[in-house]
Amino acid sequence: MKKALLIMTIATFAASAQAQEDNFPYNNEQFADIQMLRYKVEGFENLTLRQKTLIYYLSEAALQGRDILWDQNGRYNLRIRRILETIYTNYTGDRTTEDWKAFEVYLKRVWFSNGIHHHYGCEKFEPGFSEKWFRDVLKTITPPDECLHYDMEEILPVIFDPTVMPMRTNQRDGEDLVLTSAGNYYGEGVTQAEAELFYAQRKPADDPCPIMMGYNSRLVKENGVLREKVWREHGLYGQAITKIIENLQQARPYCETERQQRVIDKLIEYYRTGDLRTFDEYSILWLQATEDLVDFVNGFTETYGDPLGMKASWESIVNFKDLEATARTEKLSANAQWFEDHSPVDPRFKKENVKGISAKVITAAILGGDLYPSTAIGINLPNSDWVRRDYGSKSVTIGNLTDAYNKSARGSGMGKEFVIDKETLDLIERYGDLCDDLHTDLHECLGHGSGKLLPGTDPDSLKAYGSAIEEGRADLFGLYYVADPKLVELGLTPNADAYKSQYYTYMQNGLLTQLVRIKPGQNIEEAHMRNRAFIAHWVLEHGKADKVVELVKIKGKTYVRINDYEALRGLFGELLAEVQRIKSEGDYEAARKLVETYGVKVDPAIHREVLERYERLHLSPYKGFINPVYTALRDSNGNIIDVRISYTEGYAEQMLRYSREYNNLPDVN
């Protein structure tokens, strides 16, 4: 199954000195390991009323599914959120104590992660306040609703006992990944072996257009029998899905083309039936709708949260095309066949005829579900391998989010602390933003769309390692080609040296700086971090004899030194060929060996050093966004006459409002 979200990495620390300055308040509050940002929806005021109204209703549809993700992330999350918010809004005691301050941080972390587990590392949060304090506070609250009548003896261990549901998505080799994951994609008592057998028995042996089995359902055991509870209207999550449908219907009259109306009609049909063949039909219509300025994703999309990589979390993004910046990605998509033909992979795994590759740079208008508050900077969909094979894919780079990241990073000190010398730092400051964007474009537009499975290869054959392998494949494609003279020929890079900025920051991130996201003593669990680690450590080892790249100590600090950029590109190409072979042949054991050998373990001495150096910078390794607020102005007949946008809503204010206005699911689903 295709995994097509590229998460913004900590490597993007050096913003271009040429970037345009403005007075927009990108940076917002910081807490725990998180910094909240705002993103500017540049150009919204210049859209037509029809386009603004379309964005307004699609944005409402994007927010109506919020509770779905909360429940998918853990079956206690909605109850815990409602308890925490009741305390936050009704507590009349002393709000200056250390316990209260710790409670506020805990609630903000839970909001950010859409649940009680870390959004990236997947480990459960440890409250900085005691259970006794929490119980005492509960006794002082006059409950405005029924949430404080929950069975606290059932819920409190979920919050306070570190042995209860310790990991949302467990990826540790050798463990039962389903039983040991707290995510709500499988019912209680379902084992990994049972889930894998359930779906293996239902896959047709010779279907050239297989549905993504289990993609939109929870697998449960009732009276000893396994069955699926499908996410659809009048099914599981039906209350929220009905609200999504209502807003999609209101958006439909404002679509720019009939094709876009058909996209919405087919999506509504899928939401009503839960039929995965209808979902494939919707996906084909969606990827072929390329002429509209306004676009959106709304639905069960990515499978990172499922330890088996099958079931999709709910997410949404509404956007419109950045026409000027899209010229960059269109050059790549127009040359997709050239890139495929010149790839270093075995010809058996190349596409003879690349189809339907479209790419654009977009301006995000709203983020929802698994794209909020933490989000991606690029998207490549649909995920179905056969749809991509026969119809192609649609890729986007989210320009205003990368711009917000870059502007918020100015003056962070990361470059001076972790880049080996001034010459390299100058190179990064000159070309870093440009090459970051190009790597994202190559990753999303061409990397995920490249290559093919051999006939008879099960798209799910790599199981728990599928996400890391797929993200690594797309990253390697981007790394190999960002250094290609073809990019200079196309006018996408200014010279033959610009790519070195990307090579340095990528290797530095994979070997060093992404470790700031890992707690001491822990392994790497998240798929994107694993893919960056296995790439960086593989090339470090395989280039060791020739010292292509090395870790060196200077005045007691560890740095990355790249001695031969051309040879490094060769190593990226060599690994790309192997990763594509693994993907095309469905070689599970090779995938397991590659990821477990190079992408999981952490050197404790280097980890400790990196954490100490990073702590002195007083930075947050994770960033997320506060959404803008859209207000529809109506005439006396209720017709929308304008849509206004504002950026003044605070983080807590927004989270509480969302809980009031988009509270669509019962406590237990």
Image (cartoon, rainbow, N blue to C red):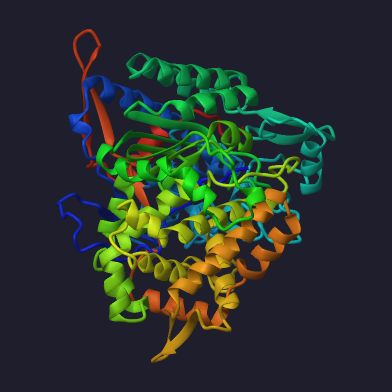
In percent of width and height, residue 516 lies at 46, 69
The image quadrant where one finds the C terminus is top right
Q: Relative to residue 538, is residue 334 drawn left or right?
A: left
Decide if residue 531 is in sight here: yes
Query: Horizontally, is 49 left or right of 358 in the view?
Result: left
- Residue 393 position, x and y percent, is 50, 36
Q: Residue at x 38, y 92 (%)?
A: 555
Residue drawn at 73 percent across, 42 percent down: 458
Q: Residue furthest top?
A: 637
Q: Is residue 103 above or below residue 333?
A: below
Q: As rendered, which of 583 and 29 lies closer to the eye?
A: 583
Residue closest to the eye, 663 or 89: 663
508 is higher (above) or lower (below) than 126: below
Relative to 163, 366 lies left or right: left
Residue sitting at 33 percent across and 28 percent down? 294
Residue 100 visible (yes or no): no
> Where does residue 10 sit, x and y in percent of width and height?
40, 63
Residue 122 picture quarter: bottom right
| Residue 280 picture quarter | top right
Q: Nearer the viewer, residue 288 or 179?
A: 288
- Where residue 633 sits, quadrant-wise, is top left
Q: Residue at x 25, y 64 (%)?
A: 410
Q: Residue 541: x percent and y percent?
A: 59, 77
Residue 242 lies, with reference to residue 383, above or below; the image says above
